[in-house]
Amino acid sequence: MGWLVILIESKMSHTKGFTLIEVLLSVTLIAILAAFTTPVYLSFFLSNDVALVTSDLASSLRRAQLLSRSGASDSPWGVAIQNQQIILFQGTTYAARDTTFDEITTFGSIIDVTGITEVTFSQLYGIPSTTGATTFTSAENNVSKTITINEIGLVSY
């Protein structure tokens, strides 16, 4: 009968589970990892927003130039940046545009815009009315991207 007591005691001393110390160490490790990776993720996220807006503007500029060259709707086309929006429009200027043809891309309010904010392309030739650069800057971490358009309408960034 003594061997039965020893057998029961040996089985009870090997119960499965986690101790409080193991749980606390695991939670602490996860908290430390989250504290270090969150700023990196946020920086990447904000940089990506600026890159996406720059790409959207480049696409809109190229599309406006293509529509102007092709004589779509027998009118020049252009792009304007107003109120956190990139607007592809039909007309000689943004103010004189036909709003039924507007194609609007919205971007976040944490992105600041400097430089040229309106370009119209000549019909059939696609020559821009304005040349220069537009810079998008993240207000959160000062990441910026610049897009330029030259005198023949080449868009680069």
Image: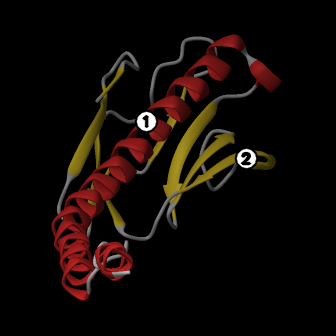
The earlier-in-sequence mark between 2 and 1 is 1
The crowd level at tag 1 (other Cα within 10 Å; few <14, some 14-19, many 20+) is: some
- Residue 30: x and y in percent read 25, 70
Q: How many labels does the image show?
A: 2
Q: Which mark is residue 102?
A: 2
Along the viewing direction, whichever of 141 and 115 lies nearer the viewer: 141
Label 1 residue SS: helix
In the rendered view, would you say 148 is above or below 124?
below
At horizontal 50% and vertical 58% (from top left) the residue drawn is 107
Q: Which mark is residue 55?
A: 1
- Residue 108: x and y in percent read 47, 64
- Residue 50: x and y in percent read 34, 50
Along the viewing direction, whichever of 60 and 16 lies nearer the viewer: 16
**In which quadrant is the C terminus drawn?**
top left
At horizontal 25% and vertical 41% (from top left) the residue drawn is 146
At horizontal 27% and vertical 52% (from top left) the residue drawn is 44
Along the viewing direction, whichever of 85 and 154 lies nearer the viewer: 85
In the rendered view, would you say 16 is above or below 122?
below
Q: Distance between the residues labelled 2 and 1?
A: 18 Å
Q: Residue 120 carries which label?
A: none
- Res 22 quadrant in image: bottom left
Q: Confirm whether residue 65 shows in the render.
A: yes
**In which quadrant is the N terminus drawn?**
bottom left
